[in-house]
Image (tube, rainbow, N blue to C red):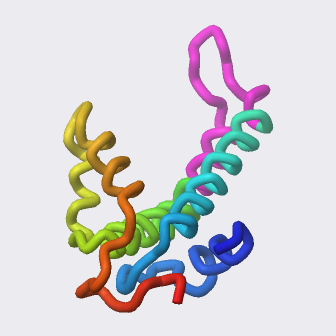
């Protein structure tokens, strides 16, 4: 799956779809998009940070909050679908709330190859 196809799937076709499966490429292309968006926003709002106090001034905070709100639902949805691809329940996403090790466990689950056959449907690349 290409970058454009992955972004189209995550942001348009399956914005809040927690059913089915997502391939590794779909998940990682969307993760790259999120990283790039927040990197660009960091550069744009970098001039809006008060370095003496470490606080972000109003406009920068609003821009970041809007970006987070726009991307949080599709990010969780593609993560749940990726877990389904490895034949894990979407509830495994909550392991990321465990301090220190939760994020690492979730990372390992996201890089696992797909499991066939699978109770969550056909392979996403078919």
Pinpoint residue 78: horizontal percent, then vertical percent: 45, 70
Q: Residue 3 location, x and y as percent? A: 70, 67
Relative height, residue 59 to residue 32 (above, below): above
In the rendered image, residue 118, in percent from the top left (x then y), is placed at: 27, 84
Q: Nearer the viewer, residue 18 or 3?
A: 3
By secondary structure, the bulk of the magenta-drawn segment is best described as helix
Above or below: residue 27 compared with residue 53: below
Say whether residue 51 is left or right of residue 71: right
Please state the extent of the stretch shown in magenta in the rendering.
45-67
Taking the magenta stretch, the answer to whether it contains residue 63 is yes
- Relative height, residue 22 to residue 75 (above, below): below
Q: Residue at x 63, y 73 (%)?
A: 6
Q: Residue at x 42, y 72 (%)?
A: 77
Instruction: Please count the marks in the image.
Output: 0
Q: Which residue is at the far front?
A: 116
- In the rendered image, residue 54, in percent from the top left (x then y), is placed at 58, 17
Q: Quadrant of residue 41?
A: top right
Q: Residue at x 69, y 50 (%)?
A: 37
Q: Quadrant of the N terminus?
A: bottom right
Q: Residue at x 48, y 83 (%)?
A: 124
Which residue occupies the foreground of this view, 85 or 42?
A: 85
């Amino acid at each position: 799956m290409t970058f454009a196809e992955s972004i189209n799937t995550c942001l348009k076709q399956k914005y809040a779809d927690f059913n089915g499966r997502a391939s590794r490429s779909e998940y990682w292309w969307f993760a790259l998009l999120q990283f790039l968006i927040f990197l660009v926003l960091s550069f744009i709002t970098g001039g809006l940070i008060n370095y003496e106090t470490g606080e972000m001034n109003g406009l920068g905070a609003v821009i970041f909050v809007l970006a987070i709100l726009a991307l949080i639902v599709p990010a969780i949805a593609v993560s749940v679908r990726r877990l389904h691809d490895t034949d894990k329940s979407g509830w495994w996403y909550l392991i990321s709330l465990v301090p220190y090790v939760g994020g690492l466990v979730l990372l390992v689950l996201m890089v696992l190859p797909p499991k066939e056959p699978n109770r969550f449907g056909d392979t996403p690349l078919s």
